[in-house]
Amino acid sequence: MKNYLFNDAKYGTNTLRPVTERGAWVATSLGGMWSILHPHPRDVYVDDLAWGMARTCRYGGQLKHDVELYSVAEHATAMTWWAIENGRVTHVEDALAILLHDASEAFYGDIPTPIKKLLPDYKIMEDRAQLVITDAFGLTPKNTLIRKIEIKEIDVRIRIDERLSIIEEPALTAGLDVIWDNDPDLERLGVDVTCLLPSQARAAFMSCMTWVCENMPYRDPAIEPLIELHLSRVSEPVCGMLPKKLEVVDSPFATREDTCHDDAEIIL
């Protein structure tokens, strides 16, 4: 990707060197390299994000024994479609902000939150990578109106759906208690947790991104050529299509007091 698409003045001289000269790096799905400490937007490829997120399991891989995988890609895709269908986002920039909110995990993995809190250096690397990835797609505070706190709210709510579907007792109840201790009135999103295999999760992620960029309006039309360039470089393009409408169900777990997990009706 040509450097003129990005504001190199925002980045240190280290980031302008070849990746092999920027210190430690990890290999990417396309055979490239991602600088751990000095990434640059020109290093961002949609294929690497989609495959990395699709192959990264949430919850440290500690899922029910009958669940093969629940990926970061499926998590982000479900959040994005829910936000679109419920009118929480209406422009490309806001939808991409949700779809890419965990994109750094394509390179660094999904570290469970309790562990992440003990690793301040990891948080610095993760935040830096997130800024670089959003910059690569032209997302800025001016053209992206959805706030981080709004994305976080959707993120926490979907954890209720996820835990009810893929976490075993007694950890299920304990985890939900932690969520509801912070907000007793928090409700699940009511989305399907289908536990897609990596190739399926990658296709679902790419379908969502393609549909968003082809069917939603841009708040800042100037970034459209950049987004088109990203999509044009995808090795296995996926047509953008709306999924079957998500069935949002009334939750019997709106508050902690109502919790009775053994009798929960999970819509899969």
Image (cartoon, rainbow, N blue to C red):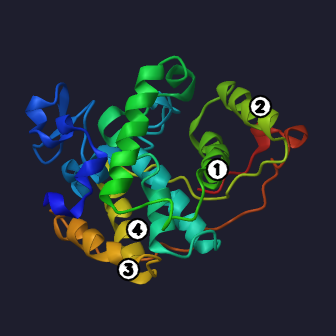
What residue did someone put label 2 on?
177
The answer to which of marks 1 and 4 sits earlier in the sequence is 1
Disc 2 marks a residue whose amino acid type is Asp
Q: How far apart are the alpha carbons under marks 1 and 2?
A: 21 Å
Residue of label 4: 208
Say which of 75 and 123 sits in front: 123
Q: Secondary structure at mark 1?
A: helix
Residue assigned mark 3? 221
Determine whether the residue tagged by mark 4 lies in a helix, strand or loop. Answer: helix
For marks 4 and 3, give the CA distance.
19 Å
Give the total of numbered labels: 4
> Callout 3, which amino acid?
Pro
Observer-nearest of 195 and 89: 89
Q: Residue at image x 67%, y 31%? A: 172
Nearer to us: label 1 or label 2: 1
Instruction: Give the residue displayed 49% in from the left and 31% down from the top.
Output: 65
Mark 2 or mark 4, earlier in chain: 2
* Callout 1 touching callout 2 (CB < 8 Å): no
Comes first in the chain, label 2 or label 3: 2
Residue 240 in view in this figure: no
